[in-house]
Image (cartoon, coloured by chain):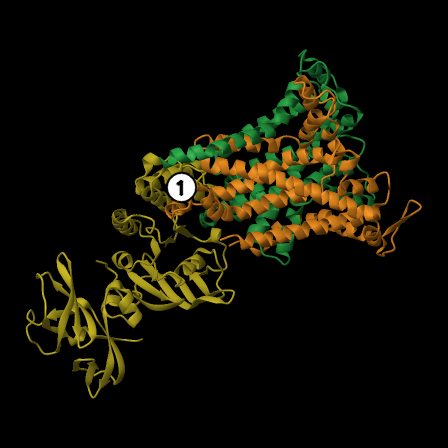
Chain colours: A yellow, B orange, C green
Amino acid sequence: MSSVAANSLDPASAVLLEIRGVAKRFGAREVLRNISLNIAEGEFLALLGESGSGKTTLLRLVAGFEEPTAGEIWMSGERLDLLPPYRRRVNTVFQNYALFPHLSVRENVAYGLRVKKTAATEIDGRVDEALRMVKIEEFAAWRPSKLSGGQQQRVALARALVNRPRLLLLDEPLSALDANLRKQMQSELKALQREIGITFLFVTHDQEEAMALSDRIALLRDGALEQVASAREIYAHPATAYTARFIGQTNLLRGEILDGMARCGAIAWPSDDPGGAAIFSLRPEAIRLASDAVARPGTARFRAALEQQFFSGASELLEVNCSGQLLRVRVSARGPLSGEHEFVFSTADAIRVQE
Amino acid sequence: MYSKAYKKLVALPPLLWVGLFLLVPYALMLAHSFWAVHDGMLVRQPDLHNYVTLFSKPVYAAVLVRTMRIAAAVTLCSLLLGYPLAYYLSFHAGAPKELLYQLVIVPLWVSYLVRGYAWKTILGSEGVLNGFFEYLHLTHEPVAFLLYSPFAVVVMLTHIYTPFVFLPVYAALEHIPRGLVEASEDLGAGAAQTFLRVILPLSIPGLLAGATFAFVLSLGDFLAPLLVGGASGTMIANVVQSLFGAAYDWPLGAAISVGLLIITVSLLFLSERLEKRWRY
Amino acid sequence: MSGHSRSRRGAPLLVYAALVFVFIYLPVIVLILYSFNRDGVGGFPPRHLTLAWYRQLFADAPLWDAVLNSLKVAAGSVALSLTLGLLAALALDRASFPGKALFRRLVLLPLILPGIITGLSLLMFLVFVGAQLSLFTVFLGHGTALISVATTELFAGLQKLDRAQEEASLDLGATPWQTFWRVTVPNLKLSLIAAGLLIFTLSMDEIAVTFFLTGRDNTLPLEIWGRLRRGITPEINAVSALILAVSVALIVIWHRVRTRGLGADAPELLERP
């Protein structure tokens, strides 16, 4: 889906934003710890995390609404964190849009240009262009309160983009929309970003949204970066148990590696990893019914009893019990099952993760 | 997000102003209460003699007790008028509720003096009420106690503070979720039970706020007694006012004012504490 | 069924509520009625209706001087207390400084303190610094005491203002100063108007503080007060009726402002003394 699928920054693209060792505390509460993150020119980066993980605070530090307790933020070789918000070439789409209720849609969009004393004719042209870009020309004279959530969202986008920021910050911009509208806005947002080429820093708690939209995901956990990588990379090679669980569904197998064998309960397979206690992440779709699979080297098998079966169209999710260990298995739809079955997975799909 | 300079600059002017024109004057009032007047001259030698006078001469205690009784009567009457009115509007008035609400508010904007004056013309011995009684042949002599009596003070102040009691009570009643009333009825409570066990307890913060307001402001009123109270309706603030005027004993007047201030502030404090206990 | 029984239960309450309304409005009605009564302010029923008292009123030069004085004081008080009240509300809403809680209580104190205490303490201060009592000292008293009203009202307005509004403005490149005038003030417009009207009315009507701070020039309430002591004529009813008319006009304006805007926030001022 995405063209930039790099674990780290593509060396060819220039770094736009550099966050260097940033920390933020509110009184005794440590909200962000030692955050270092680079964002490339033209990149779409999703800042993903649960509520309270510090993602909005990090966004506000970049916007300039908060000052970091430690660390620095640089943009294109210029120190950013010392500038007040109105001197940063960064604009924000706020979570609840924060449209000015006393101004019309057009005046809202023109606001940033007007306060910077842009010539009136230029304002008109750029505002028209921005309104057209997000398809809300016909509502230009309306007050924001008369618009639907989706339309307000578009105004908020236009209001930010008309200033031609180097970096656009989006704070859970889709969270107030219902599911269908959300999907539609996601695809429009993605298309818009490709078209105008502005760097997006997108805060969300929705992992599906992050995976669908972004070039890379930065996963925050309790104020620290857990993993930064492309969605595919994170999904295929989660670094930690937390990441594995947060991004997509997974089975966490806990056990140990001893004498070249990994043992997790009743399931065992050969492994050359260093010995000791180990956790493996095994995605439900990596497990198959043994009857489907051809016996191959590098696979492991186990027998498990079916406990529950959830049908979801093209596929079904099975909950199976392997000697007391509960596992989830995703198989293609095949009608009701019962009793004990044999399952198989490729041992390369069992990814060893940190706690 | 606000810069430190902004935060400082914004607080400074009101801080200075309030310090100079509120805090310093209050402090000066306190200082005066320890000073004395000899031969019409202010003597700035602090002692406690003003407070000794207040506690040793029974006349001050007597006026204070009368003032408290008048303020209590005003509070009670305002509650008796204001609470049922608020209850009626909130729960039974139906569609004209908003209009009726506005009608209760309107008198709040009408001059205090104008309203006091109106009562003077109504209650006077040649006033409207006496004229009305004679017109109906109920009386042949004017009923004299109506004006220039504690009664007149209570009537006038009740008239002024009823809307003040009404407002917070009404607000409290409006905040009661209607589902609670239905739940109470559903559980078998009748109207009276529902009122006593659900509505009244939940409206207590509003009731306390209104009652405190009526009591505290009545306590320090000196205009109503001058206007309609007569000699028998004299209140503590009148004593202060005459000490600052004809009697020229500012220090003693200041001492009474300080006492009034202490009573007022402790009542407010108490009411705030009580209100917190009744908030859920 | 239940609605029916409820309304029947409400019948005595309805009568009671009606009587309370009579009590609230009786003085006002009597006052207006007798302003047209040729034979003075007493007796019943009023007869020989006349406009003579109003004619007398319009020719009454000292009274109009007093009105003018009151207008000056009220206008000054509105300007002073709105300015300081806005700053105080901003400070309470977003600054943190030592003694903030005390500051809040101090600013709001005149709202609930008997006027005599505010008036007398200021009198002592003015005498202490050797100031001459005049309309200016009255204005000083009103302006200071009414900061409480402005602060309460504007603080409530600020609390309703979404912080993100101001952040959005800064984010779009507006300086704090531009943000204040383009976003904060327009959002507070309703609160500012409501507070202004309220302060104006309260100042026009103020008597307890004025009583102690006035010099040779009378304000309107003090002029009326002086005449009340000399004996009463329906001319005072006529003045009162006019004051009433102005008050009602202000209420209507205020109501318009409120219903045009977002919320019924002004009564909150009175909900908590």
Q: Quadrant of the N terminus of chain C?
A: top left
For residue B187, side relative to residue C149 (left or right): left
Could you tell me residue A54's position as x and y percent?
Answer: 41, 62
Residue found at x 37% / y 64%: A38
Could you tell me residue A262's position as x and y percent?
Answer: 20, 82
B141 versus A141 height, above or below:
above
Residue found at x 59% / y 51%: C91
Could you tell me residue A92's position as x and y percent?
Answer: 40, 51
Instruction: Indicate the secondary structure of the residue bearing disc 1.
Output: helix
Q: Which residue is mark 1?
A: A109
Residue found at x 58% / y 47%: B208
Between C260 and B53, the one lying in front of the other is: B53
Q: Residues within 10 Å of mark 1 (few under 14, many from 20)?
A: many
Question: Which amino acid type is marked by label 1?
Answer: Val
For residue C115, side relative to residue A320 (left or right): right
For residue C216, side relative to residue B18 (left or right): right
Specify the subunit that label 1 lies on: A
> Taking the image as drawn, is residue A76 in sight?
no
Between A172 and B128, the one lying in front of the other is: B128
Quadrant in the rendering for residue C50:
top right
Between A108 and C126, the one lying in front of the other is: C126
For residue B249, side relative to residue A46 (left or right): right
Q: Residue furthest right?
A: B39
Quadrant in the rendering for residue A136:
top left
B160 versus A246 height, above or below:
above
